[in-house]
Amino acid sequence: MTMERAFSGLMGLVCLFFVYLAFGYVAPIAYDPIGPRPYPILIFSLMALLTLVIAFRPARFTKVIDLGYNKVVLRNLVLCISALLIYSLIFEPLGFIISTTLMCFAVGLLFAGNPVKSIIFSVVISIALYVLFDMALDVILPLGILSGIMG
């Protein structure tokens, strides 16, 4: 059994469990006649179906893929996961703009980006995403330490 099949089978079982949980989901306020239940049921059912297809497909439809994992790739994966974990921890105190800038800069360096270009891109994308979410989509994001300046 390949890792791909084991992971897909496990993911399919998790998705089926989420479908089971979604059947009992009832929102206190519903804005549409069918309520919020069909969306998670549909998404998790589709995910369960496709992951189980991957897990149980015939061997003739598979081929071995060499992912090329070596020490450098594994180190970068661990550092990327660490950057995302740190991002989730600093998101509230530092705010969206600063924490997103730091995370984008770290990931840019992990992908062998130029430090100057990475910091410029990180600042621009953080501010652009903040403006998009705050003004266009009306999603309130934390400003953190910038709340005294911008808020």
Image: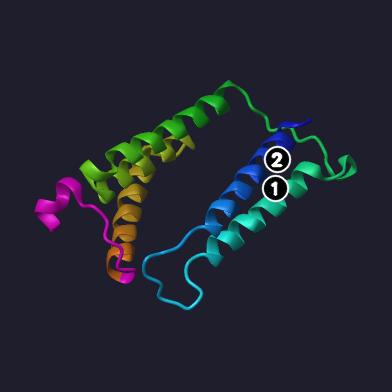
Quadrant in the rendering for residue 90: top left
Q: Foreground: 18 or 135? A: 18
Q: Which residues are magenta?
A: 136-151
Name the quadrant of the C terminus: bottom left
Q: Position of residue 124 (x, y in %)?
A: 32, 54
Q: CA distance from mark 2 to mark 1?
A: 6 Å
Q: Which residue is denoted by mark 1 in the rendering?
A: 51
Farthest-out residue, left:
148
Proximity of marks 2 and 1: CB atoms separated by less than 8 Å: yes
Farthest-out residue, top:
71
Looking at the rendered structure, the kind of residue marked 1 is: Thr
Q: Is residue 104 above or below residue 80?
A: below
Q: Which residue is denoted by mark 2 in the rendering?
A: 9
Q: Residues within 10 Å of mark 2 (few under 14, many from 20)?
A: many
Q: Residues within 10 Å of mark 1 (few under 14, many from 20)?
A: many
Confirm whether the magenta stretch covers residue 115: no
Q: Position of residue 130 (x, y in %)?
A: 29, 59
Q: Secondary structure at mark 1?
A: helix
State left or right for residue 144 relative to residue 101: left
Looking at the rendered structure, the kind of residue marked 2 is: Gly
State left or right for residue 100 relative to residue 52: left
Identify the residue at horizontal 25%, vertical 44% (top origin): 92
